[in-house]
């Protein structure tokens, strides 16, 4: 099962929307955490194709600032919204395929230092509410943990880094280290003016027994934003991500098997789209 977190830095320009949608299509996630949509709820639902391909849960932006969204594929994932604010969303995720469930927190931290203190308390309270379950935090905290998470510009220890580290230690969180790059944001300048930081990643709750599961994160190529999307693949230990499906001949000799296939075919959920797309969705359901 694949998660994706991405600070898209606004979706108002048509050309940018096209690039973002193309990036999502290439990544092929099942659950998407979006930060900084800079859109209202209805506009965000329309832009990201809710009710056509995705289901969604959005938080409205304040003017041209902020805006959050969680999207999921309803054919393979069930998501229940729990709570939200202008800086975070929390949902319960249940996979229909691999019998996997977790709490997912989509975070976009405030940029003002005066708002940070209350923000850390709010996220800590959310994590305490789900302490006995697996919690995944898709983060853009607008803060870095150390000097190693920044390249270029002024590099000095500040109160924001100290508070962020205290928050991580207190909640016993650990980061899924992503391959593919050390930084997830850049100011897109050249030479000595270039600044890059690691602002986006996934955190997991340390208290949960993660032995049966394997987590792999990767920084993906950006498209239309100055932030890079980060993916998180969750799979059972020893089980390949894409298991080949093969029909055994003995199934065809089983009494009532063909009749059952007909029943499954009729029970497949109706989806919108071209006939070829509908056909493959029915095949996937029967499998």
Image: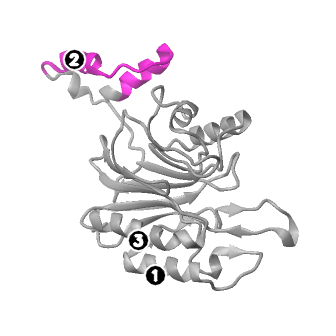
Read off the residue under disc 3.
Answer: 121
Which residue appears at 15% of the width and 23% of the height? 254
Q: Are marks 1 and 2 in contact (CB under 8 Å)?
A: no
In the drawing, does residue 231 fall left or right of residue 262? right
Q: Which mark is residue 134?
A: none
Q: Is residue 128 above or below residue 61?
A: below
Q: How far across and down, in percent of the image, does residue 233 sit? A: 45, 54
The stretch in magenta equals: 255-284
Q: How far across and down, in percent of the image, does residue 284 sit? A: 37, 28
Read off the residue under disc 1.
Answer: 166
Who comes first in sequence, dot 2 or dot 3? 3
Q: Nearer the viewer, mark 1 or mark 2?
A: 1
Read off the residue under disc 2.
Answer: 263
What is the spatial separation of the Cα atoms under label 1 and label 2, in whole angstroms? 56 Å
Which residue appears at 43% of the width and 73% of the height? 174
Does 273 appear in magenta? yes
In the drawing, does residue 218 fall left or right of residue 263? right
Q: Nearer the viewer, residue 200 or 164?
A: 164
* Main secondary structure found in the magenta portion: helix
In the drawing, does residue 261 fall left or right of residue 168? left
Who comes first in sequence, dot 1 or dot 2? 1
């Amino acid at each position: 099962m694949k998660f994706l977190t991405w600070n898209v830095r606004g979706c108002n320009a048509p050309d940018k929307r096209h690039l973002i949608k193309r990036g999502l299509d290439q990544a092929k996630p099942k659950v998407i955490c979006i930060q900084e949509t800079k859109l209202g709820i209805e506009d965000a639902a329309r832009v990201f194709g809710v009710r056509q391909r995705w289901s969604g849960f959005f938080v409205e932006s304040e003017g041209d600032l902020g805006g959050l969204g969680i999207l999921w594929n309803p054919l393979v994932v069930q998501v229940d919204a729990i709570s939200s604010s202008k800086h975070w969303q929390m949902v319960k995720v249940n996979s229909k395929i691999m019998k996997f469930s977790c709490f997912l927190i989509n975070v976009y931290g405030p940029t003002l230092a005066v708002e940070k203190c209350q923000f850390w308390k709010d996220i800590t309270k959310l994590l305490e509410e789900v302490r006995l379950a697996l919690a995944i935090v898709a983060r853009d905290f607008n803060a870095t943990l150390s000097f190693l998470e920044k390249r270029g510009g002024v590099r000095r220890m500040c109160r924001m880094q100290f508070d962020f580290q205290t928050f991580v230690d207190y909640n016993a969180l650990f980061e899924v280290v992503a391959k593919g790059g050390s930084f997830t944001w850049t100011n897109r300048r050249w030479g000595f003016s270039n600044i890059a930081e690691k602002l986006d990643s996934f955190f997991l709750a340390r208290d949960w027994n993660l032995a049966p599961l394997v987590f792999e994160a990767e920084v993906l190529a950006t498209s239309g934003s100055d932030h890079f999307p980060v993916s998180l693949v969750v799979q059972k230990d020893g089980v390949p991500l894409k298991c080949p499906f093969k029909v055994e001949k003995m199934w065809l000799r089983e009494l009532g098997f063909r009749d059952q296939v007909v029943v499954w075919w009729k029970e497949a959920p109706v989806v919108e789209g071209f006939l070829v797309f509908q056909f493959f969705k029915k095949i996937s359901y029967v499998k």
